[in-house]
Image (tube, rainbow, N blue to C red):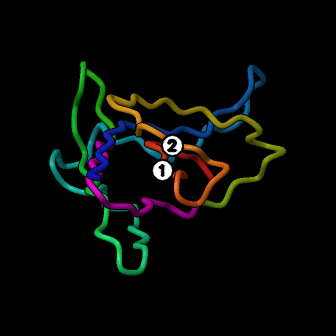
Amino acid sequence: MQRRHLAFAGLLLASSAIARPTIQVGDFSTAQLGERPVAWRLARLPLVKPTEFKVATIAGVTGVRMDAQNAGAALYRAVQVDPVLTPVLRWRWRVDRVVEGADIRRKQGDDLPARLY
């Protein structure tokens, strides 16, 4: 059975209402459309075709488009963050299609269109 899921994500570590620093982790507005974001790394799974990650603009918002058809991978960026100074994580994503039968409780059904670790 072929599984395909698309997701679109943007990420920002933001401060609370008190004047605290904001760390832009995923400002993709200046990234090259159609390419993987430069500062981000691909974590591949053994023997699995990798998910495609490309910068795209959808509905006026620039972020990362993920396209997986019988594929899986993670896109990550290591950052140093002091949770006392920057206690809020803010992101948004759009999922065009969910995976039928997905069930995080089972290894065979743990296909999810987007996750944040």
What segment carries the magenta color? 64-78
Q: Residue furthest front?
A: 1
Amino acid type, residue under disc 2 in the picture: Ala
State whether residue 17 is above or below residue 1.
Answer: above
- Taking the spot 39% from the left edge, 31% from the top edge, the residue there is 95
Q: CA distance from mark 1 to mark 2?
A: 6 Å
Residue 9: x and y in percent read 41, 38
Instruction: Tell me the residue that label 2 is attached to.
Output: 102
Q: Residues within 10 Å of mark 2 (few under 14, many from 20)?
A: some
- Taking the spot 29% from the left edge, 33% from the top edge, the residue there is 62
Q: Main secondary structure of the magenta part?
A: strand
Q: Residue furthest bottom?
A: 46
Residue 111: x and y in percent read 48, 50
Q: Quadrant of residue 14?
A: top right
The reply to whether discs 1 and 2 touch (Cβ–Cβ < 8 Å) is: yes
- Taking the spot 33% from the left edge, 42% from the top edge, the residue there is 5
Amino acid type, residue under disc 1 in the picture: Asp
Residue 48: x and y in percent read 34, 72
Instruction: Tell me the residue that label 1 is attached to.
Output: 111
